[in-house]
Amino acid sequence: MEIFEDYSRHIEKLGALKLRYPDKEISIAVKPSRFGTEISKIHFIYYALQLCNTALTHNVFIWFDAEKINDRPLVLNSLLFLAQRRRKRNFGLALQSMHRSSFAILDRLIGCGIPARIVKGAYKDGDIKDARAIRDNFLLLYRQAKKGYT
């Protein structure tokens, strides 16, 4: 799969940066829809695991950004599955504050020790449309995360 190879090359380049700047946090955001969520859960998990292994080799962190709301359950369940099987968790999930379901997802991530990145959300499929409400949700999610993570 070409996109997988592209991500792998990017991760290798980021790994070189990590070697050059060992005190810096190096991460990459990936779009799950680009490598398998439309095909099947197994397909996505396979490529997600391969990306995580490549990133682990290069000391790079992966943020999965399930940009399509319909992909979020599959991506979440896949990451929970991977978290149960990996001692070193070099991946997390970006949560959009324009989705009300982000609160429940954040609780599950906290419970499994999977990092969360809270973002405002740039997509149009959220169930919260008002800019002020999105900002308020962002702040509430941040507070929830601050309480839940050590």
Image (spheres, rainbow, N blue to C red):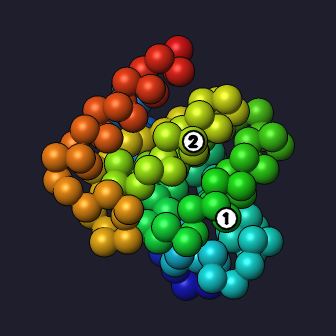
Rendered residue at 35%/31% (across/down) = 140
The answer to whether residue 42 is left or right of residue 6 is: right
Q: Which mark is residue 104?
A: 2
Residue 129, image x and y in percent? 25, 61
Q: Which residue is situated farthest in the right direction here?
A: 85
Q: What x and y, as percent, mark residue 60?
A: 50, 45
Residue type, numbered disc 2: Ala
Q: Quadrant of the N terminus?
A: bottom right
Mark whose residue sits in front, 1 or 2: 2
Q: Residues within 10 Å of mark 2 (few under 14, many from 20)?
A: few
User: Which residue: 38% across, 71% down?
Assistant: 125
Q: Where is 108 relative to 100, above or below?
A: above
The answer to whether residue 22 of the structure is visible from this angle is yes
Q: Nearer the viewer, residue 91 or 129?
A: 129
Badge number at residue 74: 1
Point 37% across, 24% down: residue: 143
Element type at mark 1: helix
Q: Is 36 situated left or right of 42 in this image?
A: left
**Upstream in the sequence, badge 1 or badge 2?**
1
Image location of residue 75, percent across then percent down: 63, 60
Q: Residue at point 78% right, 50% down? A: 81
The answer to which quarter of the image holds residue 85 is top right
Residue 20 visible in the picture:
no
- Is the residue 19 above or below the residue 5 in the image? above
Label for residue 59?
none
Front-most of 50 and 20? 50
In this view, the residue in front, 23 or 83, is 83
